[in-house]
Image (cartoon, helix red, strand yellow):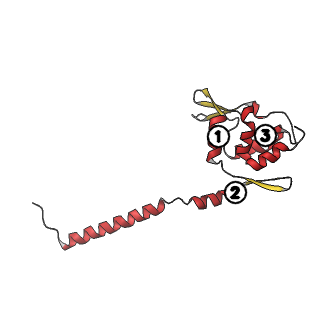
Amino acid sequence: MNEPLTVADLEAIEQLEAADARGRERQSKRLVVNIDEAWAERSAQAFEFVFQGKPYQVPAQMPARVFLFMWRHLFTPIGGGKFRFDIPDEVFVETVKQILGEELARELLESELAIGWVTSQLLLPVLQAWGVPLGQEEESTTQVEKKTALTRESSSGPGPS
């Protein structure tokens, strides 16, 4: 037979329920992700390129759309959980647009800069800053192997393309 609850039991139950409610409230506050704040912080750390007197910004961290583009077009499985990173000719222009932004890509590609220079001096440093392990062997299922086709031509600086 169940014993009747006393006033002390009811007070204890009330305290437990109140503590549980406070705990759930604290937990829900901790689960809030402020995307606006994170985006503003990310934008403040962007790469800035100045080309023909006009500033352009590239995010300091790889945007999801760029990762998805790269995964679809630039990573090729080579077996054993390894992948080769390569920029095929047929997606080179789109790759430049995805990484540097459409406007800067258009300006660069219409200029007289050598494609090899754009690749080595702009694309590769941004990719490396984003954590793409170019030319590094790592023991994991997401290995990336650099293919020398990244450099379309051997050019040490700007010049005619």
From the top left corner, tell me how far across and down residue 18 is, in percent.
33, 69
Occupied quadrant, residue 56: bottom right
Is there CB contact under 8 Å for labels 2 and 1?
Answer: no
Closer-to-camera residue (149/20)? 149
Q: Is mark 2 on a helix, strand or loop?
A: loop
| 56 relative to 25 in the view: left or right | right
| Residue 123 x/y as whole percent | 75, 43
Query: Quadrant of the image for the N terminus?
Result: bottom left
Q: Mark 1 or mark 2, which is nearer the start of the sequence?
A: 2
Relative placement, left or right, of 82 versus 106 is: left
What residue type is disc 2 on?
Gln
Q: Quadrant of the C terminus?
A: top right
Distance between mark 3 and mark 1 Cα atoms: 17 Å
Instruction: Spot the residue most to the right.
Output: 160
Spatial separation of the CA atoms under disc 3 and disc 2: 22 Å
Q: Sort mark 3 into few (<14), some (14-19) or many (20+) by Cα contacts within 10 Å.
A: some
Q: Which amino acid does label 3 sit on?
A: Thr
**Of label 3 and label 2, which has the lower sequence position?**
2
Q: Name the residue under label 3.
A: 119
| Mark 1 lies on residue | 69
Q: Nearer the viewer, residue 80 or 39?
A: 39
The numbered mark, 3 or 1, whose residue comes first in the sequence reads 1
Disc nearest the viewer among 3 and 1: 1
Q: Residue 35 at x, y = what percent?
A: 57, 58
Residue 87 in view in this figure: no
Secondary structure under badge 3? helix
Q: Name the residue under label 2.
A: 45
Instruction: Residue at 86%, 44% (x, y): give it.
Output: 111
Determine the secondary structure under disc 1: helix
Residue 132 vertical position relative to residue 7 in the rendered view, above or below: above
